Image: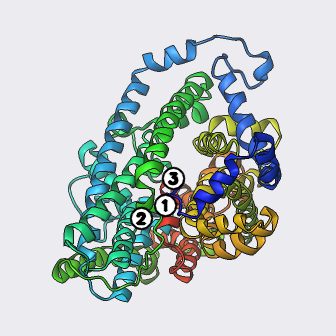
Amino acid sequence: MDRELPPQSDIVMQSTRNKSLSERIWQYKFHYIIVIPAFFLVFGLKIMPFLNGLYASFLEYKPHLGIGGSPWVGWDNYKALFQSPEFRSALGNTLTYKIIYIVAGGVLAFGAALALSGIRSGKLRSWITSMFVLPYVIPSVVLGHFAMLMFSATSSPLGPTDRLLLGEPGPFRMILLALELLKYGGISMIIALAAISATHSRFGDGISGATFGRLNALPAAKAVAAVMLLQLAMITTTDFELLHPLISPLVMQTAATVDIFVYQMGFMNMNFGPALAGTFFSYGLQLALALAAYFIVRGTLLDSLFQRDADPAADLKGGSAVAGGVVGVAGTGLVLFVLYFIFVDPFLSQSSTEIPLTELLRLPNVALSAVLFWGAMLISMLVTITLAYPMTARRLPGGTLYRIMLIAVMGIGTGTLFEYLQFRWLGMVNTIYPIAIVGFINIVSAFVLKSIFNGQYGHLKEQAELEGRGEFATLFTLFLPKIWKPLLALGALQFIVLWNSYLPSLLYIADYSKHLGMMQFLNAINMSDQLGIDRSDPILYRIGALLSLPPLVLFLLLRKWIVGGVLLGGLFKR
C-alpha cells in the first residue's frame, strides 16, 4: 500500500527514470538480499504445501499412497463439491453471514466513532476506546463458552429460561453476530476515530467550511469504507474458534460455514478431495477480492487507514458530548459486564468438585506455551522486518509483483488441510513443533509496518536516497529506529493470537497431556462429564480466566502503541 509522494520525491523519481533496469536493480540490491532468508521460509512453510495441496485437490488422495501414488481424477472433486448440498448450504450461510457482519460492523463503527468524537477530553476518549477494543484480546473459545453459560437454559447466572437459544437457528445467528461485533467491532471504530483525529490535527476548525460533516463524518466514513473493503477479502472466512464450540446439530444446517465444512469433511471424515477443493475455491475467491480491495484502497483510501497526524488522546471539537457519553457508558458497561463474568465471577462462585485446579490446568504446559510463543513471536518480528523493508522502496523494480505475491501468500492462512498434510509428511504430528512454526510468518504485519513507515517517514527515506545514503545504513539508522514501537505492538499481537488459539493443538497434537495454550481450557470443558464435573462449574471457567490473563495484561501494558493501524492486522488473523 502506498501513499501520495511528497514533492521532493519527484527529484528521486526523475533520477531513477534516467537509470537502466540493471542499474536500478543494483541500486536497490540490498532490498533483494534482505528478503532471501524470509522468502525461503515462506516458500517452505506456505508456498510448497499450498502447491502440493492444489495438486492433491485433483487427486483421489489417499494418505498411505501420498501425492505421487494417489490416482488422478481431474476436476471430479470440484464437481462433487458443488453438487454437495452441504457445501452449497455452508457457502450460502457464510456469504450471507459475512455480508451482514461487514455491514453491521461498519454502521456501528461509524456511529460509535462519531458519537465518541464528541467527548472533549482526549485522555478519557482514549481509555474508552481502549475498552471497546479490549474484547479482541479475549480468546474466542473463552468468549464462546461465556455465551454458552449466559444463554444456558438451566445454568445461566441471569436466571433459568424455557428456551435453548443456542439451539434455535435465528437466535444462534444473532448471538454469534453479537459476539463477533463485540470482539472485532472496536478495531474499525478506533481506525475511524484516528481518521477524525488526524483531520482535526491537519485542519482544525478554523478553515473555511469546517463543519462536523467535513471534520468528523467524512473522514470516519472513508476509514470505515476502507476497512469494509478489506474485510471483503475474507468473505468466506469466519472465526472458527468462536463458532466451533458453539455450533451443534440443532443449528448445523443454517449455521455451518465453509470453514466448518472443510474441517468436518477433511479433518473429521478424512474425505480429502471435497475438503481440498473447498479450500482452494475459497482461496481463489478471496484472492480475487483481496487484490481488488488492495488496489482500490491503495489508490483512494489508504490515508484513512494509516494516519500520519493522528493522536488518539488529542482533544476534539464538534459533535455531541451527550451522545459520546451515552455510547461510552453503554459500550464500557457491556465490556465490564463480560469481563466480570469471565475474570471475577468464577472465583467468587463456589465449585462443587473436589478436583484441584492443578489437575485440570497443567502449569508446565502453560510455561512451555509461553516459551514457544515468545520464540515464535521473535522470529515473526524478524521476518516482518525483512518482508516489509523492500516495500519501503517506492520504485523498486518488481515491487508491485512482490506485493501481489505477498497478498497471495497472505490468503493461504494457517490451520489448513494441506499444511497439516505437510507436517504429517515431515513426522511432526503429535509434537510441539508445528504449534510454534505456524506463528513464524505474518504477512499482514509486514503490510501494516511498511504502510505506517511510508505514511509517516517515507519522505525521510526519499531524502536519504537523495543524499546518497546506502539502503543498508538506512535500515539501521532510519527504518528500525522509526518503527520499533509499532513493530513491538505487532509482535505483542502475534503473541496474543498464538496464545489465544487452540486450533494448532487440536489439529497437530493427539496426546491430551501435550496440549498447549487454550486447548487446556477446551479439554477441561469437553472432559468434564468423564470427570464428573458439571459443565457450568466455576472451576472450569477459572481455567479460562487464568489463561486469558496474559493477553489482557500485555494489551494494557502496550495500550498506547496498539493503535488503529496496528490493530488492522487483527481483522485478518482468523
Q: Nearer the viewer, residue 189 or 433?
A: 189
Residue 163 in picture, x, y percent from top left: 22, 53
Disc 1 target residue: 568
Question: In the image, is residue 266 above or below residue 125?
Answer: above
Cβ–Cβ under 8 Å for marks 3 and 1: yes
Cβ–Cβ under 8 Å for marks 1 and 2: yes
Q: What amino acid is found at the position of numbered circle 1 in the picture? A: Leu
Q: Which mark is residue 187?
A: 2
Bin the neighbour count of mark 1 within 10 Å (Cα to Cα): few under 14, some 14-19, many 20 and up. many
Q: Nearer the viewer, residue 65 or 561?
A: 561
Asked whether residue 356 is in view, the answer is: no
Disc 3 target residue: 572
**SS for tag 3?**
helix
Q: How is the image coloured?
A: rainbow
Question: In the image, is residue 160 above or below residue 309?
Answer: above
The mark closer to the camera, 3 or 1, is 1
